[in-house]
Amino acid sequence: MNAVAVIPARIASTRLPRKPLREILGKPMIQRVYEAAKACRGLSQVIVATDSEEILALCRHYGWEARLTSPECRSGTDRVFEVAQQVKADLYVNVQGDEPLARPEHLDVLLGVMKPGVEVGTIYTPCRAEDVANPNAVKVVCALDGRALYFSRSTIPFDRDLTGTVRFSKHLGFYAYTPQALAAFCQWPESELERSERLEQLRFLDHGVAIHAAETPFDTVGVDTEDDLRKVEAILKAEGRA
């Protein structure tokens, strides 16, 4: 299948200005994300989708494929959809531009989810103890067949009897969509659950579209703050990926 990865990279960020261009151990964040996606052999193209001429210029400097998208895009998914109107593919993969710990292994697992009949795929990893009650770490509960039942910033499932044996899963923000599912998502209005949790994937579940998920052993840190940058630097050094 022809799978195209799109990396949404918005220059404006309220908590961390100019986020995609912030350096992490000598490399702009967007470079680390791009290099991880480019190393995945299952992808036919990797495209940076940005609203910034400065990010576009950086991409051209390195010879990366990039598209200038509308500043009116409300989300990274909308930016992926805008690219999808210009670049045809069997699958579109959303690799968020603030995931500098992304690995090609993440994308290998994600592409493996997209069997015939699957419209939307994502990935998760075992949730660290310190993230179980952390609302910034999104938890997911899946059915036995791999379908995501729900995503929440709350601690799910709830260990009512305090057994200590409940397994928690942390959702990672990587998605794959068929063209039809991506188009439908961007035509639907924001759903009530999505608005409540501030999790756009709930829009699919609200409309009855199954999201299939698979596990990866590799956690990530989505970067939103200066503290997140420092965490990523420490992890990269510890893993010898500096």
Image (cartoon, rainbow, N blue to C red):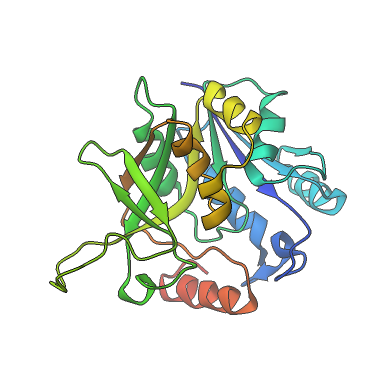
Q: Position of residue 234 (x, y in %)?
A: 49, 78
Residue at the limit of the structure toward the right, as seen here: 53
* Residue 198 in view here: no
Residue at the limit of the structure toward the front, as seen here: 192
134 or 107: nearer the eye?
Answer: 134
Q: Position of residue 85 (x, y in %)?
A: 70, 23
Residue visible at 54% across and 75% down in the picture:
233
Q: Is residue 153 left or right of residue 79?
A: left
Residue visible at 44% across and 27% down in the picture:
119
Q: Is residue 125 left or right of residue 23?
A: left
Q: Position of residue 202 (x, y in %)?
A: 48, 44
24 or 122: nearer the eye?
Answer: 122
Give the image quarter of residue 108. Answer: top left
* Residue 41 in view here: yes
Residue visible at 70% across and 39% down in the picture:
79
Residue visible at 51% across and 22% down in the picture:
2
117 or 1: nearer the eye?
Answer: 117
Relative to 75, does residue 242 appear above or below in the rendering? below
